[in-house]
Image (tube, rainbow, N blue to C red):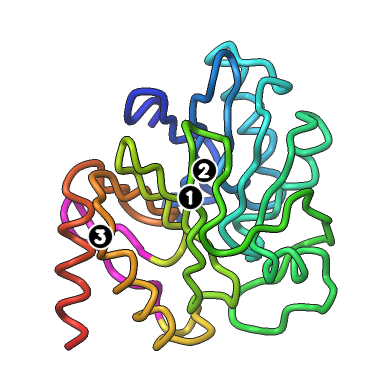
């Protein structure tokens, strides 16, 4: 998909099959720096580095790697990417514990393929000086420490697996069979519906580049 918004790239080649879309986002930062949001399945680092080469970005220009949650399709290439880019890595403090396999995660979805210790453990409301300035919102439900990252100036919401994109104007919650607690996911979705969002940058399906907030509000109205 390449550059889907100014300075926002959807990395090509990370999908394991035509039936399973995984959207790893690369976002332009200050100067020549870049931020990566999620890392794909084990082995996806090869496609990520190939894409960086294609757009003439050195791996060491990636200064931040933000993880939305612990599942293997998001953390599978975290260790390999951190080793080559030397980027600082970020995750919510709950997810960071499970990513480090301390304790082992036993909920729905695949746990990390190997333990990894992130550099920065976030809490709700923390700001990250990356991708033009991001706010970390704790959005539990899919996993205990699931986190969405919001860029208020451009009204971008990197929603991880809180939402699935279902076409050009539709958002859904992640299916219950992959979610630790569906009620918490609904509460998180209601909270995100209060944000002013233009682009809803989901990890599976979508993304919704326009009217993302309207799609979230429509979804939330259906909870009643």
Quadrant of the rendered structure where residue 73 is? bottom right
The answer for how far apart the CA atoms under marks 3 and 2 are is 17 Å
Mark positioned earlier in the residue sequence (1 or 2): 2
Q: Are circles 3 and 1 on residues that touch, CB within 8 Å?
A: no
Q: Where is residue 152 in the image (x, y as percent from the top left)?
A: 35, 43
In this view, the residue in front, 159 or 113, is: 159
Q: Is residue 181 magenta?
A: no
Is residue 12 at all visible to an observer of this figure?
A: no
**Residue placed under numbered mark 1 in the picture:** 135
Residue in the picture at 55% in, 44% down: 37
Q: Magenta segment, which residues?
A: 163-175
Residue 89 left/right relative to 32:
right
In this view, the residue in front, 181 or 154, is: 154
Residue in the picture at 32% in, 47% down: 207
Quadrant of the rendered structure where residue 95 is? bottom right
The answer for how far apart the CA atoms under marks 1 and 2 are is 18 Å
Examine the rendered structure and indicate whether residue 66 appears above or below residue 162: above
Say what secondary structure mark 1 lies in.
strand
Quadrant holding the C terminus:
bottom left
**Residue placed under numbered mark 3 in the picture:** 166
Which mark, by number, is residue 196? none
Dot 1: few (<14), some (14–19), or many (≥20) neighbours within 10 Å? some
Mark positioned earlier in the residue sequence (3 or 2): 2
């Amino acid at each position: 998909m390449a550059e889907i918004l100014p300075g926002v790239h959807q990395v090509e080649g990370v999908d394991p099959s035509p039936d399973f879309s995984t959207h790893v986002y690369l976002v332009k930062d200050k100067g020549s720096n870049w931020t990566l949001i999620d890392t794909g399945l084990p082995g996806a680092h090869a496609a990520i580095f190939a894409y960086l080469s294609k757009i003439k970005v050195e791996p060491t220009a990636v200064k931040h790697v933000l993880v939305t949650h612990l599942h293997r399709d998001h953390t599978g290439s975290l260790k390999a990417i951190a080793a080559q880019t030397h980027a600082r890595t970020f995750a919510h403090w709950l997810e960071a514990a499970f990513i480090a396999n301390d304790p082992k995660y036993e909920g729905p979805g695949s746990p990390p393929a190997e333990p990894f210790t992130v550099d920065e453990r976030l809490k709700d409301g923390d700001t990250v000086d990356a991708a033009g300035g991001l706010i970390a919102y704790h959005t539990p439900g899919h996993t205990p420490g699931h986190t969405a990252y919001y860029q208020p100036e451009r009204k971008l919401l990197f929603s991880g697996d809180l939402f699935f994109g279902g076409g050009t104007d539709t958002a859904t919650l992640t299916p219950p069979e992959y979610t630790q607690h569906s009620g918490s996911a609904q509460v998180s979705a209601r909270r995100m519906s209060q944000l002013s969002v233009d682009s809803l940058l989901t990890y599976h399906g979508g993304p919704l580049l326009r009217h993302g907030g309207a799609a979230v509000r429509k979804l939330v109205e259906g909870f009643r």
